[in-house]
Amino acid sequence: LAKRLAASKGLDLTGVIGTGPGGRIVKADIEAGVGRSGGGAIRRNPTEFVQVPNNAMRKIIARRLTESKQQVPHFYLTVEVELDALMALRAQLNADAERKAGKGNPPAYKLSVNDMVIKAVALAMRDKPNCNVSWYDDAIVQYNNVDVSVAVSTDGGLITPIVRNADQKSLSQISTEMKDLAVRARANKLKPEEFQGGGFSVSNLGMYGVSTFQAIINPPQACILAVGAGAPKLVMRDGGVREIQFMNATLSVDHRAVDGALGAEFLQIFKRYMETPILMFV
């Protein structure tokens, strides 16, 4: 009966999931399929899965992150950052760049929130050099330069190009350099020294609408900052209710090299630069 009904409706029974005894396709399966899809039937792909071979980059990422979670004692600290002042300053700087370029011409730079996060992280690393470290069994290595690794997603996997001496660079320099690094990272054109090293990592998933997450430390670094999306909240301010934009930033820390209080102090400094962004220019 089911076969005749399917034939009359021009339905292909290949892969249809049967609900009768032993998985047999019955009349109800045909009618249910027609009712749900307006004439179509549920079809099951006869090929249950395919294997996608792991490339060399994916294998290295898997090994390093597995080692990190197994061998590095992670702990996590989250802080809520007010964004209104930073967003206003960003808009002013981008508008000024457009004005200077002239109508129809591309501006010299276009700052993103992530560019400003990189700068704030770099300045906080400069102010708290004990967070710019790596753990080794015989010593804690403290770096003399402030080099920030930034997670970039590529077709082959995650790579972390480095903005070197980020504490000394202007926001426009960081923005231009980061765009170039990201483009070449996705084209697999980075030199080894452009993604190997760094003293601290930043991973931003705010552009995907992720509000909060905990990133895995990129060894041998001791810290990585996970940045979420900004979102408005109603808060009491100056005797009234105001809508203010906030974002969450979560610091993952290697407890062997950085203690809880030190990690909290770092986040306080980062928060101050983000909420008072004019300090980035001092």
Image: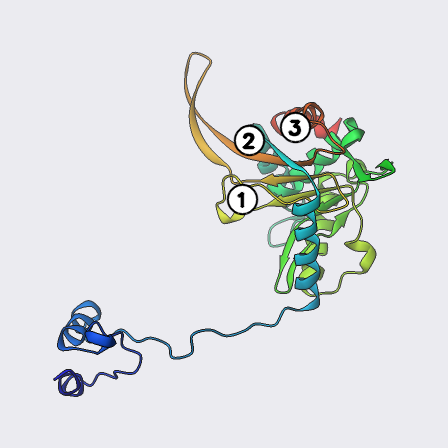
- In the image, is residue 119 above or below residue 34? above
Which comes before the other along the chain, label 3 or label 2? 2
Image side of residue 231 versus residue 268, left or right: left
Task: Name the mark nearer the viewer: 3 or 1.
Answer: 3
Q: Which of 241 and 265 is in front in this view?
A: 265
Q: What residue type is labelled 2?
A: Leu
Q: Identify the residue at image location x=18%, y=73%.
A: 29
Q: Which of 30 and 119 is in front in this view?
A: 30
What is the C-alpha distance between the residues marked 1 and 2?
Answer: 13 Å
Q: Which amino acid does label 3 sit on?
A: Leu
Q: Identify the residue at image location x=79%, y=53%.
A: 196
> In the picture, which quadrant includes the N terminus?
bottom left
What is the C-alpha distance between the residues marked 3 and 1?
Answer: 18 Å
Image side of residue 231 versus residue 193, left or right: left
What residue does disc 3 label? 267
Q: Where is residue 157 in the image (x, y as percent from the top left)?
A: 64, 60
Which comes before the other along the chain, label 3 or label 1? 1
- In the image, is residue 10 above or below residue 245? below
What residue does disc 1 label? 206
Q: How crowded is mark 1: few (under 14 residues within 10 Å), some or many (20 or more)?
A: many
| Image disc number at residue 83 | 2
What is the C-alpha distance between the residues marked 3 and 2?
Answer: 15 Å
Which comes before the other along the chain, label 1 or label 2? 2
Check the image and tell me how it is coloured.
rainbow
Q: What residue type is labelled 1?
A: Gly
Q: Where is residue 14 in the image (x, y as percent from the top left)?
A: 30, 83
